[in-house]
Amino acid sequence: MQVLLKSAGQGAAASMAPTAQVIPLRDGSTLVRDLVDQYMKQYVGRDTTRVTRLSFWVTALGDLPIGEVTDDHVDAAMQELAQRRAKFYAGKDADGAKVFRAKGKPPSGATQNRYLAALSSLCTFAQKKRLTPRTWVNPCKTVEKAPENPGRLRFLDQDEIGRLLTACRAQKWPRLYLLVLLALTTGCRRGELERLRWRDVDLEAGLMSIHETKNGQPRVAPLTDPAIEELKRHTGAPADLVFASKQAPGEAFTFDAQWHAALKAAGLRGVVFHTLRHSAASQLVMSGATLHDVGQVLGHKTLAMSQRYSHLSTQHKAKVVRSSALGSIK
């Protein structure tokens, strides 16, 4: 009996012993193509171009173990990319397959750098998952980025905003005004507003929760009083989309026709929906908000994203100084 009890006790102790932890080999043997599969399975961001860019790297480096990828490999692939003719989405064919057509010029410097950034994210993922040797360095860090043309940052001034909102009110779709008003006052992206549901809107607190964002980080957007009043005019069930289609309530309303009609009526050129996000940031900066404040409201992941509005901040400060007592000192 004692022997049996001892055996039973040993068995119980054995069952309570901690299981051996599986430690990654860190030998860098995972192929780039397999690493991309692992990465995309856990990817929660809203960047719809991530698959396209990583597909390029699968073609260029897919058969290489990640631990053997060097900056020379990456640089050679980037040079090849710079010579390619960029493609654009041209709709679907008769069978529903996506159709891409070639542009007349190679991808821009900004586009090339986004391809490099996608690979860099993949390499960082491999390091965090301990799939690379401890001494392995992300090869993208020593590859020179392509020069970018900053271009003109288009945003609406107060007069243009007034004309656009007036034109939106005159459109047949009654919620276009609300949509544009929210975009201008919260800086939300089009997709964020299209996914917005009534349960995400707290009218009493004056807050709007954005759960799915481009960078995968949820945020809360404060609502202005005019936006709250307009939302109260268009209430719905908690699970309903705020901007739902009448024909397909589970999908967002396609408002492109009304949007372009409003732009035409307002006499605005060079404006896309994303211009409203830039306009929200510009209004914040010119009202005295810091670049950190702008990043918090718009959900920028880094301060560098907000830095593009720094010139507006400088202009605002110059205006304040010149209109103050300092401006009269001779």
Image (spheres, helix red, strand yellow):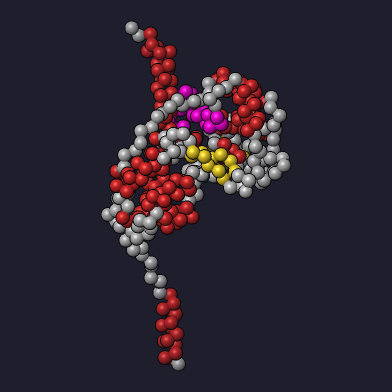
Q: Of all residues shown, which one is farthest toward the bottom?
A: 1
Q: Of all residues shown, which one is farthest toward the left?
A: 135
User: Is 115 positioned to the left or the right of 198 in the image?
Assistant: left
Q: Report the magenta residues as a range.
A: 272-294
Residue 107 sits above or below residue 320 on the image: below
Quadrant location of the C terminus in the rendered image: top left
Q: Residue at x 41, y 78 (%)?
A: 14
Quadrant location of the N terminus in the rendered image: bottom left
Q: Residue at x 63, y 33 (%)?
A: 256
Percent from the top left, x then y, of residue 204? 63, 37
Q: What is the chief secondary structure element of the magenta stretch?
A: helix
In the depicted view, which residue is nearer to us: 190 or 311? 190
In the depicted view, which residue is nearer to us: 38 or 188? 38
Q: Is residue 245 magenta?
A: no
User: Is 189 positioned to the left or the right of 123 in the image?
Assistant: right
Whether residue 139 can be seen here: no
Whether residue 4 can be seen here: yes
